[in-house]
Amino acid sequence: KQEVTQIPAALSVPEGENLVLNCSFTDSAIYNLQWFRQDPGKGLTSLLLIQSSQREQTSGRLNASLDKSSGRSTLYIAASQPGDSATYLCARNMDTGRRALTFGSGTRLQVQP
Amino acid sequence: GAVVSQHPSRVICKSGTSVKIECRSLDFQATTMFWYRQFPKQSLMLMATSNEGSKATYEQGVEKDKFLINHASLTLSTLTVTSAHPEDSSFYICSASMFPGELFFGEGSRLTVL
């Protein structure tokens, strides 16, 4: 079964901490991997997209890495802020050409002021 | 970035009625759109792949006669929930892509069936 797993399921940290969110997938065949942010009751905001040929992508305080061989991706958030509080979802696009995403269950992040 | 718009954002209907949700790509042409469903505190589950000018491809377990998908143009796909029941209450999200680029998501539509 093709699964995407995210740990931890929930995380609460004080403001200013650096943190790492983990994403793993069971099949190393991958077209790309995308990290999203979802605020309660809202749609998805794309944060970072990593192509299968890439190892990492950076945007501001966010850095995402991809290790195809181990089936893992991490999202690193530097100097966390209360505004970072949201659910973070990783999604894998299989190397099938369909381009539909398989989502992880998400990590609910709470950054306390 | 590219913008995908969904309408309505919220809809409440009586059991047995049909509800249509629209998904539009505002600044690009999308040959393929995807419809997802999300139950509370769960992740997104793909329902179907919508291809412009052809029939949608449904995921296993999704009733094609209940969830009608039409992709009549390169900028519009619609999802119609027919004869809705309370168990259909969910958050429906569409996405679209400019092949082979990244996927962009709409803001979602919350359906509540009374």
Image (cartoon, helix red, strand yellow):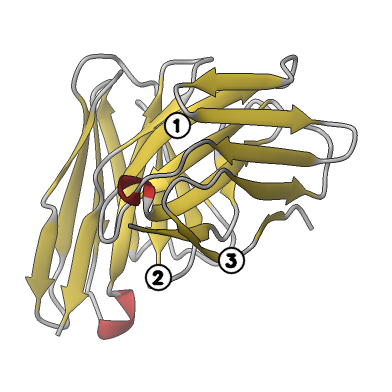
Tell me residue A68's x, y (percent): 82, 31
Q: Are marks 3 and 2 on the same chain?
A: no
The quarter of the displayed image where residue B22 is located: top left
User: Of helix, strand and loop, which one carries label 2?
Assistant: loop
User: Of helix, strand and loop, which one carries label 1?
Assistant: strand
Real-space Cα separation, disc 3 to disc 2, in angstroms: 16 Å
The quarter of the displayed image where residue A16 is located: top left
Tell me residue B19's x, y (percent): 15, 62
| The label number, if any, that marks residue B114 in the structure image | none
Q: Are marks 3 and 2 in contact (CB under 8 Å)?
A: no
Residue A27 is left or right of residue A98, and the answer is: right
How many marks on residues? 3
Task: Pick whichever of labels 1 and 3 is earlier in the sequence.
Answer: 3
Q: Which residue is mark 3?
A: A9
Q: Residue furthest right?
A: A69
Tell me residue B34's x, y (percent): 42, 40
Q: Which residue is mark 1?
A: A47
Locate the N terminus of chain B by quadrant: top left
Mark 3: amino acid: Ala
Real-space Cα separation, disc 1 to disc 2, in angstroms: 22 Å
Locate the C terminus of chain B by quadrant: bottom left
Tell me residue A70's x, y (percent): 88, 39
Q: Nearer the viewer, residue A31 or A7?
A: A7
Mark 2: amino acid: Phe
Mark 1: amino acid: Leu
Subunit ID for the residue under disc 2: B
Subunit ID for the residue under disc 3: A
Real-space Cα separation, disc 1 to disc 3, in angstroms: 19 Å
Q: Which residue is mark 2?
A: B39
Residue B48 is left or right of residue B22, and the answer is: right
Q: Mark 2, residues whose alpha carbon is within 10 Å: few (<14), some, or many (≥20)?
A: few
